[in-house]
Each structure stands twice: as structure tokens, then as C-alpha cells.
Image: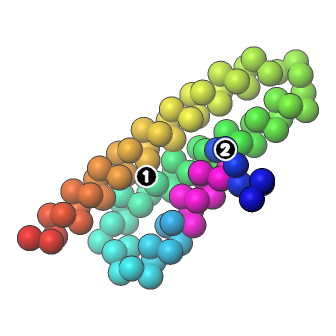
Amino acid sequence: MAFLEGTLGVGVGLLLGLAFLKYSGYVDQLRKELGYFASGSVFLLLTSVLSEVADRVPSVTTAVGWINVVFAVIAFILVLIGAIAMAIQIFSRLK
């Protein structure tokens, strides 16, 4: 699907993954860790929205480019923290 490419597709994919995780039964145990995923996906959605702004308003292209880089790094860090914390929680309960 052409409209789900780039950061928009990753952000929507993360949010869909969170919605489908509800049916696995892990949501009650992983509330805090899922918050990292959700906030990371919101930063990715903001990045895709700002990209559209940069395309429409040429005078802010450089500033929006740097903001997109910062938002993408923040999203990566939040999703990475959430994934590591979630893996630790799940694997510690399997014992």
C-alpha cells in the first residue's frame, strides 16, 4: 500500500501491533512497557506529518528536516527501551 510507506507505515504498524496485542493476554502485565511503544509510534506519526509540511512550505524545509531527525531518534530510543523492557518482563515470567 503506497500510503503506508516510510515513517507513517511504521507508526501505524506499531499502533496496530499494540491493538492486536490486546488479544494475547499480556496487556495487563506490560502496561508501562507498552507506553514506550505508543509514544514512539506517536513520534513517528509526527515525523510523517512534518514531512508533509516541509513539502508544502519550502521556507521551513531545513528546520523540519532537523526536527524529523530528532523525532525519529527519539522514536527509535523509545521503541528500543520498550522492546527491551518487554522482553525482560516476558522472559522473567516464563521461568
Residue 7 horizontal/vertical position (percent): 64, 44
Residue at 33% x, 66% y: name it. Answer: 30
Residue 68 horizontal/vertical position (percent): 65, 30
- In the picture, which quadrant includes the C terminus? bottom left
Residue at 71% x, 42% y: name it. Answer: 48
60, 2: nearer the viewer: 2
- Asked if residue 23 lies in the magenta stretch, the reply is no
Q: Earlier in the sequence, mark 1 or mark 2?
A: 2
Q: What separation in Å lies between label 1 and label 2 (alpha carbons)? A: 20 Å
Q: Residues within 10 Å of mark 1 (few under 14, many from 20)?
A: many
Q: How many marks?
A: 2
Amino acid marked by disc 2: Gly
**Dominant secondary structure of the magenta stretch?**
helix
* Image position of 60 (left or right of 47): right
Q: Say which quarter of the image contains residue 35.
A: bottom left
- In the picture, which quadrant includes the N terminus? bottom right
In this orientation, does residue 46 appear?
no
Give me the disc on residue 58: none
Residue at 59% x, 51% y: name it. Answer: 10
Q: Say which quarter of the image contains residue 63.
A: top right
State the residue position of label 1: 36
- Asked if residue 13 lies in the magenta stretch, the reply is yes
State the residue position of label 2: 6
Q: Are marks 1 and 2 in contact (CB under 8 Å)?
A: no
In the figure, 79 relative to 63: above or below?
below
* Image position of 57 (left or right of 36): right
Looking at the rendered structure, the secondary structure element under dot 1 is: helix
The part of the chain drawn in magenta is 8-16
* Image position of 86 (left or right of 91): right
Amino acid marked by disc 1: Tyr
Residue at 41% x, 60% y: name it. Answer: 34
